[in-house]
Image (spheres, rainbow, N blue to C red):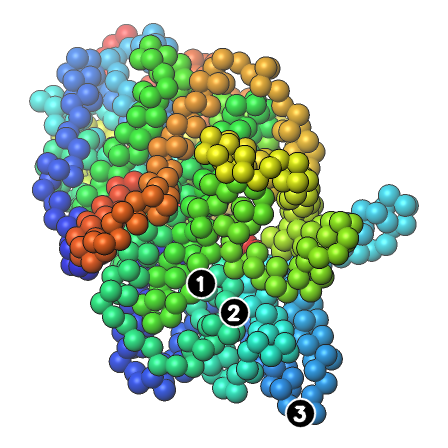
Amino acid sequence: MNFHSLDYVVFLLAVLGVYWCLGARWQNLFLVPASWIFYGYIHPWFLIPFLVTTLIDYLVALGIESPRGHRRLLVAASVCSNIGLLAVFKYSDFFVTNVGGVLDALHLHLPLSVLGVILPAGISFYTFQSIGYVVDVYRGHARACRSLVDYALFVAFFPLLVAGPIQRAGDFLSQIQRPRTLTPAQFCSALYLIIWGVFKKVVIADSVAVTANKIFLLKDLSFPILWVGVLAFCIQIYADFSAYTDIARGSARLFGFELSPNFNHPYIAQSPSDFWRRWHISLSTWLRDYVYIPLGGSRGTPARVTVNLLIVFLVTGLWHGASWNFVLWGLYYAVLTLLYRVAARLVPDRIGRQWPLAAGRVLLMFVLTNIGWLIFRERNLAQLAHDLALSPLTASAMDWRVAAFLGTLTLFYSVPLWIHTLWDLKLRHVFAARESAVALWVSPVVATLLFTCILLLRSDTSADFIYFQF
Amino acid sequence: MVLFIFGVPALFRHQSLVRTPFDETPVKLLNQLKPDCVLLGDSMLGSRIDAETLKQVSDIPCAILAYPGTATAQWFLLLKNAIAARPHPPRWTIVFFRDRQLTMPTHRTGNRYRNGLEMCMRDDEPQFNSILHRAEDDSTRWTERAASALYLIQRKRKDWQENMLSGALKTVTRRAERNDVRAAAARIFSSKNGRADQNILDARDGEESLNIVGHEFRANVEKSFLPPILEIARASHTRLIFFRVKRRPDPGTSAIVDRPDLQKYQEELRAYLEGHEALLVDETADPKVTFDYYSSDDHLRYEMMAPYTKQFWKEVKPLLGSAAPAE
């Protein structure tokens, strides 16, 4: 079920109505099947691997805490089962295809067949959340959940099931285990988040997607047309994914839950590390805590740190999909991070803090991010090489004019994102003293305006959220 | 707060705020040409019939009302409010259509088509709305219907989207350049420049819906715009000829053989039309219209329009019968 569909509105209202009529004891029990219905709405079979992994991780965590448990073995079993699930559904076809290609090149023609199964939605999110839970229990950062219902809700809670944010057991399980309330202020902020999320999806993301999709389907691209397509995709993917997160957080807040944020204005990042502190925060912190730091993090020899960075960004790339362009995208960020580390040693810190240079760094990082999005978006490596080799000098004047037109259109649609950034960074604290007045008067007016814009400006064509495919 | 957010946009209900005014262009064209024969249809007509060639080969005054991206809902409105509304309606109206289009009342009536439909509405069009709503009840979810009824302001969506486009264009180009930039953008994004046929997003939405296998004639005709179209034609003494165009055949072939269900549909359509004083001309089996006539889809190549128009008139002229003015 899509968050920006009317089906979801009906579903959410129905579930909310019943949920708040129930006593605290029954609320979790009710949310679990409701979440399963949400998840299995289109493909009921998606529930099979999901339920299996839920049961395994629930039992493993209990086993880890039992006095006679083989703790390491159990963690390994849980990690293997989750990674195995990902391997079968997400990576097996990629692996078989590539192995087949290598064997063919060696004239060893073996009959290898691909599975060709549909990737269950959200599999990368819930497996990582489950692994995080088991490892946290193993490390003693969280207690194993005794209630199967509570644990099932931890994994299945529908607002975050399909595309995160990936939650930590220590925070989210404790919210599940205590009674929830909903204050009028919470309700208003939740509603605002949902409307803002839907606006970003159907007005911004879906509108600029028209430009991006059309350009990435062209065979004869010129330099300006290509890069205006990349810019459109850059706006699209941020608006799309952050929209999902906002709707998820808003929906969860209506049930009395607080989910962790996933974005912090990523396009004003000044370096690759800064970008990953601002983009898909729940994934980058997960990878930091469960991959990078266990590998040794930034301690150790430069060679060791380099290897650690390469591994963690390789995992980041592969997490997004079984395709070479995602591997390349991960490696691109690894190389960028290493280059920035070298540069940081050469440039004195105080110089970097001066505002014209800071602005220059933001601009440079924005350009580098866009190169990254080109690698991310273009799955055909030959086409990618062709795209990267395009020269601005060979484009016609008319191509530049068309690109200026499409780029301006993209910027028009993205204006609300920039206003939102400006509000968060510069204006919010100005109005901090008048927060209640803002909540009472400004928020409803802005929400009404956004809703009216949804009615008037939403795109004719609306696709699934991009991160559903991961 | 909830009432305020979701209530305010629902207040914009006045027709003048949400409805596009009637477009007099077709009426003016008919007044100017005073045609005996009107050709009505979507881009199947627009990409087939060349006005100049038609003027040369036809021996009677003809008018072409080609509205790309339209279907029976808009043809009904054009027939009622422009063609049949004339003091002396034309003697013949030839409607170009594809396959099962005539019994698909909701085809091309969604939000993106709303402006075009409203431009052909004289008043509240109760008959039109009743047919459309009944058909939408069958094909649209109640949630979508409720949202459409509550927020009439959505009907201005096309205008706002166009405002965004033209705003961006005006920002970066001078007035004299705008048409060139739009044309260049259309050229860059034309299907010829796509990477692979199967990857090209089909901007001409609604075409897939013409291929619905289970759509039967008898089960759908009474719910469609066809009966009122026939009734209006009868009342205004204009004879209807429905011209089924041939869709693009496969490369190397010229003949199209309908699947059994489509054959049955066409037989029933023919019997129905003949029972209501209308005619059906089916071009599908015509071997003269070969693959070479077509562009990448059901539209004809520009250079084939003139020869096609001659062939078309040759085909249709005998049907206009002895009532046609002498040459």
Q: Is residue A58 visible?
A: yes
The chain identifier of the residue carrying mark 3 reads A
Q: What residue is shown at x 23% (from left), y 24% (from top)?
A: B92
Residue A240, x across and y down, in percent: 44, 48
The N terminus of chain A - image quarter: bottom left
Q: Nearer the viewer, residue A327 or A283?
A: A283
Residue A348, x across and y down, in percent: 60, 37
**Residue underneath mark 3:** A67
Residue B127, x across and y down, in percent: 15, 44
Outermost residue on the bottom side: it is A68
The C terminus of chain A - image quarter: bottom right
Report, in whole angstroms, how far the alpha carbon at label 1 lies from the one at label 3.
33 Å
Amino acid at circle 1: Ser
Report, in whole angstroms, how far the alpha carbon at label 1 lies from the one at label 2.
9 Å
Q: What residue is shown at x 33% (from left), y 13% (from top)?
A: B174
Crowd tier of the residue under label 3, counting other residues whose Cα lies within 10 Å: few below 14, some 14–19, many 20 or above? few
The answer to whether residue A328 is left or right of residue B74 is: right
Which type of secondary structure does the marked residue at label 2 adopt?
loop
Q: Which label was assigned to residue B277?
A: none
Report, in whole angstroms, how far the alpha carbon at label 2 lies from the one at label 3.
24 Å
Q: Which label was assigned to residue A260?
A: 1
Crowd tier of the residue under label 1, counting other residues whose Cα lies within 10 Å: few below 14, some 14–19, many 20 or above? some
Residue A437, x across and y down, in percent: 18, 55
Asked if marks 1 and 2 touch (Cβ < 8 Å), the reply is yes
